[in-house]
């Protein structure tokens, strides 16, 4: 069959080499290839006329070799759609599997398509679960995934989980099933304890990375740090700053001493400053350090000689990222001055330091790109940041007291200063109790590279603190002027006009968060009709109802998820959505306090799924059908 | 083993003969094995590679052989610190040829077992795929879409719903 001859004749590129589809169609593959290599279809003499005795297997190998160099997910997905043989080759060569929503696809489907996976990333619960808005035991269990992978991926090396429920048994199975296992990263996970960690530490002899980030870990009183092999380890990263109980320090010190490749070490708040000292002098090669408590040692009270913290830090010539400071004793701050000039990332979000104390540090930090702070530093601290950190890309300002009644230590003044000093800013998260449109507009103009803008005005429906107007114009300016914006969080007093702006200008916005804001259903309608790129929508305590929900039917299949809690939805409207969109899983969730008032929906969480509704839904979840 | 000043002759599928030094020949595992087995006096037939492709492969092998020799001589002084980068740039330019020839180079590198050339040329093709839609990829490589519209739509959904996140 010469199906492709028409296409190749006169075509300059005329590549039959990667057109493996023909291998499926033809009987005599050599013959067809010769026929397709028509004279005149090559650019010069001889370019297409070689006799290709290469069997199909060779060509498939070559395609696999090419695809090996394709790493970006989008590119791999595109390649898989080219034709059937490319689909097969891509499936064989995809080594990093990414599952954006664990309930959008079954483990069985994933592992039957991709058979040679070395690295898996899975995301589970929606983000609002971090704020205790999702009842316990909702789901996102790792168990079915690890069970399937234990059979299918013997060469698995890396597992990254975000917002998943992980048990000790899961971790034991993991440690027993994957002899090449190297990296475990658990972000915002829960359900496991030190027994599970002990299994991983003890059995995964190739382990390089063990990172526990913002996860809830049970203290089963198993000394997991003692379970690492006694010989030198391959550890490059050990992060456990979220652990809320002590670890065995001797075991930790010994582990650090026999881990020459260790670059990242983040300690929890139970590690004292003098213990920190002992670790830092053993690991001057560190690039990322979480300092633990950084609190005043007993020596201070006793008036005893303290170790030379500053020279210990000074010996860390490669340190670029500093965090921790869980119970900071500000007098120790000078110890970190020697490393400040090289710092690109500084996380002070647990350090309740004032403006002066921050200034003493920040004045050295000219290379800083990422800064997380508490609002205890006040507008004055932010002004100091603006004056020094000209390379700043990401800023997060967290509230020390998320109190609605106070004036708050940071305001529009700090935001304005940052916008004027840090023109390269790409991402900002800013909590405050007062704000003005003017400052937000200024930021929209001064920081054109903004990709993420999240403004959280604590207190409900707060207007512009100076003019009393809604915050519409500020957010409008952000979507209008920040042409690269993909993530937006809004708050304060907002009318439908604000949402109209978002729908009109926010064409690249993929994630939108709305909390305690909004006026009528029109607002949400504008967003659902206008934001063509919208993937993730999370709304809480906002006055949007059934009509607004209905207006998004055309778009929900294009979205990763929609979360609406404490809004004005009825079960009937949710059911209508479920009936209109059969591949959408529409979960109506009752919070555990269980106000079973039938005509309000406490939580709506909906997402598309290839494999139908899940079968592990707890009793407080109703899947609408 | 023959000295590096000796040459051998390879023959393309078009019947043309090409001379290459031993050092250049050593870039290809296949040629090296054939020489080990059969000696250097005969001409080595490489009937899977046409003359146009052969000429390019010769050029590559010579360049990389010269680079290696220079490294060995002065302990790297002749190459200097930027030597590897320069070679990479040369490789990139070398591979800027039209697609038909590029694909033939891949197949030749695969057959002749010249790993570095295989990797570079496959990378070059992968770079052509990056950022493209399936339609664009089909056009570049002149590939027929053998999915039915239904199959394609289903796969697209599967990719977007399950296996893609930005």
Image (cartoon, helix red, strand yellow):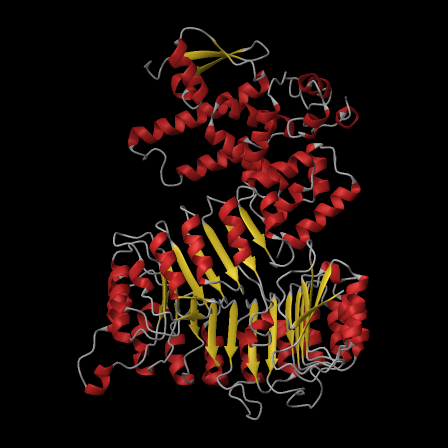
Q: Residue at x 55, y 45 (%)?
A: A71
Residue nearest the observer in this picture, A217 or A66: A217
Looking at the image, residue A122 lies above or below residue B31: below
Q: Quadrant of residue B64?
A: top left
**Residue A80 in picture, x, y percent from top left:** 65, 41
Residue B78 lies left or right of residue A56; in this view the side is: left
Q: Residue at x 33, y 75 (%)?
A: A270
Q: Residue at x 49, y 76 (%)?
A: A386
Residue nearest the observer in this picture, A174 or A442: A174
Quarter of the image containing the C terminus of chain A? bottom right
**Residue B154 in picture, x, y percent from top left:** 73, 47
Residue nearest the observer in this picture, A432 or A198: A198
Q: How many marks?
A: 0
Residue A534 lies left or right of residue A224; in this view the side is: right
**Residue A470 in picture, x, y percent from top left:** 71, 85
Q: Of all residues shown, which one is farthest toward the front?
A: A619
Q: Quadrant of residue A534?
A: bottom right
Q: Of all residues shown, which one is farthest toward the top?
A: B42
Q: Quadrant of residue A440?
A: bottom right
**Residue A339 in picture, x, y percent from top left:** 33, 68
Residue A504 in view, yes or no = no
Residue A197 in view, yes or no = yes
Looking at the image, residue B54 lies above or below residue A241: above
Residue A325 lies left or right of residue A558; in this view the side is: left
Quarter of the image containing the N terminus of chain A? top right
Looking at the image, residue B38 lies above or below residue A281: above
Residue B76 lies left or right of residue A250; in this view the side is: right
Q: Of all residues shown, which one is farthest toward the left?
A: A305
């Amino acid at each position: 069959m010469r199906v492709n001859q028409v296409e190749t004749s006169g075509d300059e590129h005329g590549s039959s080499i990667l057109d493996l589809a023909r291998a499926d169609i033809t009987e005599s593959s050599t013959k067809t290839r010769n026929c397709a290599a028509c004279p005149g279809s090559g650019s010069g003499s001889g370019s297409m006329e070689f006799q290709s005795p290469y069997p199909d297997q060779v060509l498939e190998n070559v395609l696999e070799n090419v695809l090996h160099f394709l790493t970006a997910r989008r590119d791999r997905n595109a390649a898989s759609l080219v034709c059937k043989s490319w689909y097969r080759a891509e499936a064989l060569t995809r080594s990093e599997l990414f599952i954006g929503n664990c309930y959008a696809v079954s483990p069985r489907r994933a592992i039957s398509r991709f058979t040679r996976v070395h690295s898996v990333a899975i995301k589970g619960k929606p983000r609002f679960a971090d704020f205790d808005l999702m009842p316990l035991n909702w789901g996102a269990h790792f168990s079915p995934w690890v069970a399937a992978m234990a059979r299918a991926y013997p060469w698995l090396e890396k597992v990254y989980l975000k917002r998943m429920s992980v048990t000790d048994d899961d971790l034991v199975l993991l440690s027993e099933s994957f002899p090449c296992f190297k990296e475990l990263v658990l972000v915002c996970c829960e359900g496991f304890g030190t027994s599970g960690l002990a299994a991983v530490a003890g059995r995964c002899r190739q382990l390089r990375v063990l990172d526990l980030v913002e996860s809830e870990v049970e203290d089963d009183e198993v000394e997991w740090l003692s379970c690492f092999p006694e010989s030198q380890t391959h550890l490059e990263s050990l992060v456990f700053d979220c652990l809320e109980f002590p670890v065995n320090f001797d075991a930790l010190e010994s582990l650090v001493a026999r881990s020459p490749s260790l670059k990242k070490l983040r300690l929890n708040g139970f590690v004292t400053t003098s213990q920190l000292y002992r670790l830092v002098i053993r690991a001057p090669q560190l690039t990322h350090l979480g300092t633990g408590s950084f609190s005043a040692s007993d020596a201070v009270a006793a008036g005893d000689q303290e170790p030379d913290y500053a020279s210990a830090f000074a010996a860390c010539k490669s340190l670029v990222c500093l965090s921790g400071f869980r119970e900071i004793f500000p007098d120790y701050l000078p110890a970190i001055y020697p490393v400040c000039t090289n710092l690109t990332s500084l996380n002070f979000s647990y350090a309740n330091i004032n403006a002066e104390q921050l200034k003493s540090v920040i004045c050295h930090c000219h290379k800083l790109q990422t800064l997380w702070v508490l609002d205890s530093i006040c507008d004055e601290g932010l002004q100091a940041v603006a004056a020094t950190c000209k390379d700043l890309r990401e800023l997060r300002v967290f509230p020390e007291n998320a109190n609605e009644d106070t004036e708050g230590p940071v305001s529009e003044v700090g935001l304005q200063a940052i916008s004027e000093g840090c023109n390269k800013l790409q991402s900002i998260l800013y909590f405050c109790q007062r704000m003005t449109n003017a400052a937000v507009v200024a930021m929209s103009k001064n920081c054109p590279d903004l990709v993420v803008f999240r403004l959280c005005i604590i207190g409900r429906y707060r207007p512009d603190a100076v003019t009393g107007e809604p915050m519409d114009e500020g957010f409008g300016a952000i979507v209008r002027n920040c042409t690269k914006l993909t993530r937006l969080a809004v708050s304060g007093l907002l009318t439908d006009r604000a949402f109209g702006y978002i729908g009109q200008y926010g064409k690249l916005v993929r994630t939108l968060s709305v909390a305690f804001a909004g006026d009528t259903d029109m607002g949400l309608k504008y967003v659902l009709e206008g934001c063509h790129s919208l993937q993730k929508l999370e709304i809480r305590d906002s006055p949007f109802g059934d009509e607004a929900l209905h207006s998004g039917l055309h778009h929900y299949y294009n979205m990763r998820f929609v979360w609406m809690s404490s809004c004005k939805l009825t079960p009937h409207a949710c059911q209508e959505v479920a009936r209109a969109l059969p591949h959408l899983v529409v979960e109506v969730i009752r919070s555990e306090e269980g106000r079973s008032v039938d005509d309000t929906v406490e939580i709506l969480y909906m997402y598309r799924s290839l494999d139908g509704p899940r079968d592990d839904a707890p009793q407080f979840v109703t899947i609408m059908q | 083993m023959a000295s590096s000043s000796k040459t051998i002759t390879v023959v393309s599928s078009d019947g043309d003969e090409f001379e290459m030094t031993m050092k250049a020949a050593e870039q290809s595992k296949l040629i090296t094995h054939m020489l080990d087995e059969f000696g250097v006096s005969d001409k080595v037939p490489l009937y899977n590679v046409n003359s146009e492709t052969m000429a390019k492969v010769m050029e590559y092998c010579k360049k990389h052989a010269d680079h290696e020799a220079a490294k060995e001589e002065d302990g790297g002084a002749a190459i200097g610190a930027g030597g590897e980068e320069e070679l990479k740039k040369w490789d990139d330019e070398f591979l800027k040829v039209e697609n038909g020839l590029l694909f033939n180079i891949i197949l030749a590198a695969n057959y002749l077992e010249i790993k570095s050339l295989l990797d570079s040329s496959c990378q070059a093709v992968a770079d052509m795929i990056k950022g493209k839609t399936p339609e664009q990829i089909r056009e570049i490589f002149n590939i027929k879409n053998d999915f039915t519209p239904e199959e394609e739509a289903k796969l697209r959904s599967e990719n977007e719903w399950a296996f893609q996140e930005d």
